[in-house]
Amino acid sequence: MTTTAQTVSNNKPRPVWQLFFGIVDQPAATFQTIAVQSTGSMWAAPLIGVILCFAVLIIVQTPYNLELAREQMESQLASLPAEQGGAARAGMEMTMTMPFMLATGLGFGIVTLLLGILAQAVFLYFSALVSGGEMTFGSIFRMSAWTSMPFAIGFLAQAGFMAFAQRMIQYPGLAYLVATGELIQDARNPMFVLLGRIDLFWLWHMLLVMLGLSVVARFGQGKSLALTFVYAVLSLTLLVLPTFLFGGMMGS
């Protein structure tokens, strides 16, 4: 089989569709290709892939989110006087529809995904630059886009589970370790949010980040591992920060 280095040296770039398989079974060789092939498809293809997989998850998940939102709304309105409850219900009715929740879920989620990948690329680029890496921002951005592939597969796995089980995933990742069974209460717990992020797909993503840095920035294993660890800590901190800041307000 022709290696990636041979393919590039022979001026025969690998087709993008091969990279989707390569990121799974030959990630280091795939990152070598990504580092030198700077065509638009090198960054657009993984972004389109993760967006499509996310869209599948949102389409499957939204009916369950809508049902849960309606239950929470009725629980909150039950404590209000009849007139206030009726007025509040009328004002919230528009947001408790499938088209609204689907549109907002897709819109907000896709923007968050793209900003997250961009922020990852910016952090890794400047961190690697300070650490003596030799790369361009474009190569780091392409690498960051391809490291999102575990999340794309994770979206499909979650959607498949919900479609088969006909229920939501209440405790993602390691969240079951601190779960109480009360979803609203658990959502205010920073440890629940933190542990819910940590699963096999997240760990796979971190492994790809480490491998990508070793190839694209030409780092040794030690430096790649250290920078990946800093990235992991920062990303998890930013994830739970809103819970620390607003968890108490939500509970009041």
Image (spheres, rainbow, N blue to C red):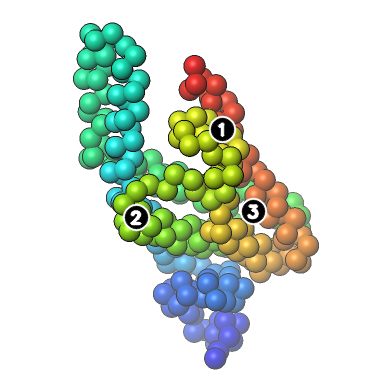
Residue 171 in the image: above or below residue 136: above
User: In terms of secondary structure, where does tag 2 sit?
Assistant: helix
- Residue 189 is labelled as 1
In the rendered view, does 250 fall on the left or right side of 195?
left
Which residue sits at x=38%, y=57%?
161
Q: Between residue 195 and residue 152, name the one nearer to us.
A: 195
Amino acid type at mark 1 = Asn
Q: Between residue 198 and residue 182, name the one nearer to us.
A: 182
Could you tell which of marks 1 and 3 lies nearer the N-terminus?
Answer: 3
Q: Nearer the viewer, mark 2 or mark 3?
A: 2
Amino acid type at mark 3 = Tyr
- Residue 125 is labelled as 3
Amino acid type at mark 2 = Ala
Residue 246 in the image: above or below residue 105: above
Mark 2 to mark 1: distance in Å?
26 Å
User: Which residue occupies the extreme right position in the image?
Assistant: 222
User: In terms of secondary structure, where does tag 3 sit?
Assistant: helix
Q: Which residue is mark 2?
A: 165
Mark 2 to mark 3: distance in Å?
41 Å
Mark 1 to mark 3: distance in Å?
32 Å
Which residue sits at x=34%, y=14%?
79
